[in-house]
Image (cartoon, rainbow, N blue to C red):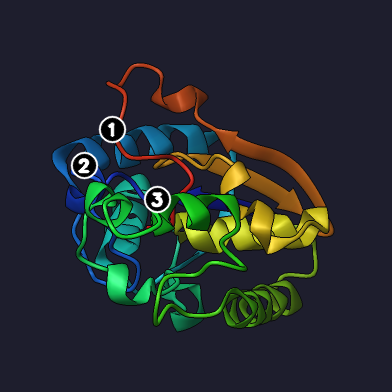
């Protein structure tokens, strides 16, 4: 099985650098354009099925990217973005201004310095790995399988494949509508954005959970 792991396009909260996590937020106009560019990149592959997060920004990205192709889209709740607890709905600058700059601490060590009330990264890892294992059990013959999810979800899985601590999570850059390719247990490509070059740069910080 070859996994084509796509992050959703820019959301309206990515655009203004607002934490969304488990909040269901729609794509921006740029995000829809990014999804169309992702669709052009996917023409070089033959995904048998697309497994997607149930969140609107991921689901719409898959629908736009696969428009006109006979690829089933299957929603998997385990692929939802990790919750950021009390930070959801706040901007990055608002969190930076809190005592001790918890945003900076979280960037450096998200496993050790999570937002209050956030979903533990170990729990995210268990559910994401469980979903990937179920997908792998269904596709044993080397097929291409598309997964459209979130920066946090894909970063957690990439850390798993690389065998690194989740404190390294945000050292992995994952842009909106990027394509990461895995042939478990190998990580083959991380954050391919070549298909997005004609588009304007997104203001969203690439690696953050969204």
Report if the CB atoms under discs 1 and 2 are less than 8 Å apart. yes
Q: Which mark is residue 23?
A: none
Q: Which residue is mark 1?
A: 203
Gap between marks 3 and 2 measured at Cα: 29 Å
Q: CA distance from mark 1 to mark 2?
A: 6 Å
- Report which residue position mark 3 lands on: 69
Residue situated in front as seen by the camera: 77 or 158:
158
Residue 78 on image: x %, y % = 51, 80
Which type of secondary structure does the marked residue at label 2 adopt? helix
Name above or below for residue 82 compared with residue 205.
below
In the image: residue 156, left or right of residue 101: right
**Structural crowding at the residue carrying mark 2, measured as other residues with C-alpha within 10 Å and reported as few (<14), some (14–19) or many (≥20):** some
Residue 89 at what x, y percent from top left? 20, 65
Quadrant containing the N terminus in the rendered view: bottom right
Secondary element under disc 1, as helix, strand or loop, is loop
Q: Which residue is mark 2?
A: 15
| Residue reaching furthest to the front | 99
In the image shown, does 124 or 180 lie closer to the viewer?
Answer: 124
Relative to 32, is 204 on the left or the right?
right
Q: Quadrant of residue 44?
A: top right
Dot 3 surroundings within 10 Å: few (below 14), some, or many (20 or more)?
few
Question: Splitting the image into 4 quarters, where does residue 197 fall?
Answer: top left
Instruction: Return the disc, 3 or 2, that comes first in the chain's sequence.
Output: 2
Specify which label sits upstream in the sequence, 3 or 1: 3
């Amino acid at each position: 099985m070859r996994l084509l792991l796509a992050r959703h396009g820019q959301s309206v909260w990515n655009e203004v650098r607002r934490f969304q996590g488990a909040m269901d937020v729609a794509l921006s106009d740029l995000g829809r354009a990014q999804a169309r560019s992702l669709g052009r990149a996917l023409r070089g592959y033959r995904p048998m099925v697309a497994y997607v997060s149930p969140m609107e920004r991921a689901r719409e990205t898959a629908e736009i990217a696969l428009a006109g192709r006979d690829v089933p889209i299957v929603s998997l709740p385990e692929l939802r973005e990790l919750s950021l607890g009390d930070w959801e709905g706040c901007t990055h600058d608002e969190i930076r201004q809190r005592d001790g700059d918890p945003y900076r601490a979280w960037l450096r060590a998200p496993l050790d310095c999570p937002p209050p009330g956030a979903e533990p990264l170990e729990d995210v890892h268990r559910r994401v790995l469980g979903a990937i294992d179920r997908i792998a059990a269904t596709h044993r013959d080397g097929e291409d399988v598309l997964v459209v999810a979130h920066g946090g979800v894909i970063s957690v899985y990439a850390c798993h494949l690389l065998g690194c601590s989740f404190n390294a999570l945000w050292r992995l850059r994952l842009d909106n509508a990027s394509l990461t390719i895995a042939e478990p247990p190998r990580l083959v490509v991380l954050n391919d954005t070549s298909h997005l070059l004609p588009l304007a740069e997104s203001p969203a910080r690439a690696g953050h959970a969204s």
